[in-house]
Image: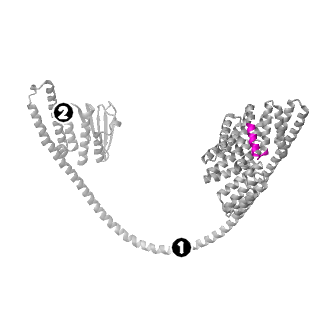
Amino acid sequence: MRLSKWIYSCFGLSTVGIVVLTTFLFFHKGLAQRKSLTDLKSELQKAKTDTALTKSYYGLAMDYYFPLARTDSLKRISKEISALNQKTNWPNGLYLEHLLNGAIAKLNGNFYEATQLYFQALRIAEQRKDNAQLARCNYELGNCYSLLEQLRVSTIHYQRAIKLSKLVNNQELLGWCCNNIAQDYAAQKKFTPALEYYREALSVFEKIDLLTGKANVLENLGTLFYLQSNYPKAEEYLLRSNKMFIQLNRSKYMIANNYVRLAETNLALNKTIKSIQYANKSIEIASENTYSELLMQAHDILYLSYKKLSRNAEALTHFEKKIYYQNLKNQDEKTRMINALKLDYENKKHLEINQLQKKELTLEKKVNFILKAGVITFIIFVLALLIVINKIKKQNRLIVFQRDEIKDLNVSLEKKVLERTHELSIANQELIKKNAEIEDAIFNGQKIERKRFASELHDNLGATLTSVKWRLEAINKHNLPPKEQRNYESIVESLKNVYSDVRFISHNLLPTELEREGLIGALSKLVSDINNSGKILIHIQNDGIELDKKVAFEVYNILMEILGNILKHADATFVKISLIKMNERFKVTVKDNGRGFDIDHTSNGVGIQNIKERAKSISADITFISKTDKGTEIIMIV
């Protein structure tokens, strides 16, 4: 027999029998263990609830009528389950209904319909998050897609079923999933993964001691080795499988199928006599049960065997029988296809009629609803209109009354508003006056405190520094070693600088020039003192601005802080200070030719923060512009 026929017959791609039988063997453990019809009907009578009745009906269908392929009985049971589910709307009942209908469709060869029904069962299992049911649904979908020759999709479902069966520890389902996915791989000539899955399936079935599973896997392994031209190994596994099937005595089809496989294997091994013996055994069993496909395959092997032995007359006889059964098989397939198409057409027609009836019923309901809604809406509209008219009349009367009241209230309110406005104006002026007095008091207090602090610095700290300086100068430095002389001169010089700084700070805490001559006078005196040092030249540009004492004081301190930073850090030789009027504000600019600084890294320094805080206290905007070795420009808008 040709390779393609071998693959299809062995892996269930052209016949429903093997896949349906495998499903039955897995879920119902064979004919020998199924319950009797009397027992199943007894369970039906004992069922007291609708859910229990649903389970009993499903058990009756799958344990008794499904292995007998009694689709008429299965359909009647499906209707009973459907009627119960309409009453209870029990999710598990709906799941069982879809599962049963899927099995019926598969028996009839309607694999697409079966797939849709199994997907409906899958959705219910997903909603219930039932991993056992999800494993079962994916297994059934894998079988359907395998029958439809969509092996890539069937493999995906088998792999999901394998994962879920491991999760729920369903070893039996795991074994059948591994067996079936191996069949798909073998049909695609992917022999390595097929062999791995067959071995895993055999290991599982041996572990749970399931003879049916072991017999199936051994037959499939024999087929796999045949496809790989390992004929001795193929014969070994097929013989082991056939021995188990005979021991089970449950399926004549599987035994006859095994004899065909053994006959073909022996033909490949050039054991022609044994090939004829096995083929005749297959014909003997297949003839009793009218397995036309197996009869066709067996006669084909006999034809090839007798032809090999040059017994042409016998070869011709079996060739004719092969053609007969092939035509019979083709006719069966055509009949099944026609029946499937007819059923599909009837289903679609029935569905269209139902949809049309539903549309007519929906349209009738809509018309009735619109008529009723129209009448009710009209009545409501008339009632609402009467209520609105009555409310408008009442509101008009109320408006006239309220209008007169409002007129009286407006006159009274205007008087009260004028009186209150006058009171608030007086209170506001008093507040402004008080605030000014408080600000003057605070500023004067600060002035007094600054004078006291300046006096303390000059009189106490200055006197102490002078005393220390005199005592140091009284020491004869010539009596000291050279290194100590240098330290002595350094200390004396540092004391002079400290004394100068103390005098500078005490003087500038509240310079008398700021009190007497204002900002420009005090600033001029400060600049003059710095210029006299000869270290730097400072130039002032002034537009004759006049400032409030508090603002002038803060601006003076800011400029003093800026100049102090320039003298300490900038290494500048020239500084320009400009004070320019700008409408109601004025602009202060300080620009030097020093070494500048990196604003991004220096903006958080104490000196700059002090300047910013002082500027903020008088609501001034201040900007720093500086680049390394290109000087610094500070702009303040007051």
User: In the image as oriented, which residue stretches furthest toward the right?
Assistant: 313
Q: Where's residue 238, x and y in %?
A: 75, 37
Left/right placement of residue 66 relative to residue 372 reads right
Q: Where's residue 108, x and y in %?
A: 78, 50
User: In the image as oriented, which residue stretches furthest toward the front?
Assistant: 247
Residue 384 belongs to magenta span? no
- Identify the secondary structure beneath mark 1: helix
Mark 1: few/some/many CA within 10 Å (<14, 14-19, 20+) = few
Left/right placement of residue 606 relative to residue 370 reads left
Res. 233 in view: yes
Left/right placement of residue 138 relative to residue 408 reads right
Residue 238 belongs to magenta span? yes
Q: Residue at x 67, y 52 (%)?
A: 121
Look at mark 1 in the image and give the residue it sits on.
391
**How would you classify the magenta stretch by its main secondary structure?**
helix
Q: Where's residue 296, x and y in %?
A: 84, 40
In the rendered image, the quadrant that contains the C terminus is top left
Q: Amino acid at mark 1?
A: Lys
Look at mark 2 in the image and give the residue it sits on.
532
Q: CA distance from mark 1 to mark 2?
A: 93 Å
In the rendered image, the quadrant that contains the N terminus is top right
Task: Name above or below for residue 370 compared with residue 505.
Answer: below
| Image-quadrant location for residue 279 | top right
